[in-house]
Amino acid sequence: MNMPDKDFDSLFRTKLGNMEVEPSARVWNNISAELNGFQKRKLSPVWSIAATTVLLLSAAAWFLTDKPVKNQQNQVAANRKQVVIKNQPAENNVKTVTPDAVEQLPKVDVDYNTDVNKIAHVTRKTIHQLNIKAEPVKQEAAQSVIVQENTPMVDKGNQQVLAAVANQTEQQAVVPDMSLNNQTLTGAAENISQSDAIKVSEPVMARQPERRKKRGIHTLGGLINAVIATVDKREDKIIEFTETDDDQADITGVNLGLFKVKKEK
Amino acid sequence: MLFIKHKYSTEDLIARCKTADRKAQELLYKQFAAKMMAVCLRYATDKMEAEDMLQNGFIRVFQKINDYRGDGSFEGWVRRIMVHTSIEYYRKHHKMVQLDIEESGFEQPVNALAASSLEAKDLLSLINQLPAGYRMVFNLYAIEGYSHREIADMAGITEGASKSQLSRARTILKQKIEQLEGKQYEYAG
């Protein structure tokens, strides 16, 4: 007897339609685990947004807090320029560094942690020390070592200005430091000739990149160094890179605790 | 099972599942798991495959439960999800067999009495032995009651392919039943 397709299909439908088979217990366990994962995944965009926000805010905070320092330094530089220009006609007020002053200056080690009065004292002292009459030198050399007594900023005596002046003092102190290494200056007579003055200005220029390092990050190496510095507080960081303006960042130092390597800069 | 049915109605469980209540999800799962496992078994080659389909199907049920508005039976809604999940699983794991078989002129004669005496598990076993594509079309058409056009849309095949695969599936099943009948006669003799 041939069975029509319709009946054949309905045989399967009726027999299998009401069938029940218990699945194994692992199925529910897997479903439950997956649903937990699903709910977690649903939350994840919220977390990623939160994490991104925190990251952006901290980055913004880092850059914003870095800026005022830069501005302050720029302002100091600007002030210095102004003062120099201001003092140019009044030759009497412009004092130049003599070998005597050079010897005394390195002692002036300004500690920024000391109170304002101390800084003021040190600053005034420095200014006093520098207030020794000598022959004027060529202007290029003079610009880098100029300190003026009658700067109105000092008289005001407010904290910010003093700090700025102290900054200035420190920067100027670099010059005598360098000058000490300069054989021509240490043995120099009271009269500094023009050619000597030019020699003084050369090491000053050579120190420029190092000064810039303090102001901010300009290279990839500098950026990595800054990041490492926030984590590694040791003097010799776990790894250090060059901060020259070259595109390449070379490793200048490695410190793995027992194993230390450091290139001389 | 009885205890669960007395304590919570399916509607209560559905409402609680909509708030992602894990206990309600478990109770709802237990209420429908065995029925849906039988559905998945028809589309699968073996029990392991069927359980994978069941798992994927129920995860989708719970993810989409807010879409169930109470129109039609909940069991029917869950079953449709199971069928769709099984087709998806099949398409992912089996290469679709695209055969253009001519409508077979030869029909295997099947003894109706012998066929009806076969147990559900025997029929299921016969279906499981079919090539995956035939099995899917036969399930969708003969048991679920979808039209060839619907099957073509769901499975991503042509209507012609659906028809030829159904025909081929029937032929194979009839042959197998004949073989079983022959064995039965042998045993009887």
Image (spheres, grey):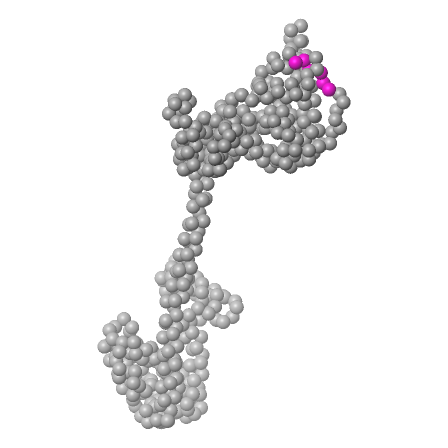
Q: Position of residue B6 (x, y in %)?
A: 39, 23
Q: Position of residue A169 (x, y in %)?
A: 33, 80
Which picture quadrant has residue B104?
A: top right
Q: In the image shown, does A54 or A121 lie closer to the viewer?
A: A54
- The answer to whether residue A39 is magenta is no
Q: Residue at x 26, y 84 (%)?
A: A155
In this view, the residue farthest toward the top is B189
Say if A34 sits above or below B140 in the image: below
Q: Position of residue A227 (x, y in %)?
A: 41, 62
Q: Which residues are magenta?
A: B107-112
Which picture quadrant has residue A170?
A: bottom left
- The answer to whether residue B111 is magenta is yes
Say if B133 sits above or below A73 in the image: above
In this view, the residue farthest toward the front is B71
Say if B8 sits above or below A200 in the image: above
Q: Residue at x 37, y 72 (%)?
A: A69
Q: Position of residue A47 (x, y in %)?
A: 42, 50
Say if B33 sits above or below A181 in the image: above
Q: In the image shown, does B149 or A8 lie closer to the viewer?
A: B149
Which quadrant would the C terminus of chain B be assigned to in this image? top right
**Residue A263 appears in the rendering:** no
Q: Residue at x 61, y 29 (%)?
A: B146
**Residue B29 appears in the rendering:** yes
Q: Residue at x 39, y 67 (%)?
A: A64
In this picture, residue A239 sits left or right of residue B172: left
- Main SS of the magenta segment? loop
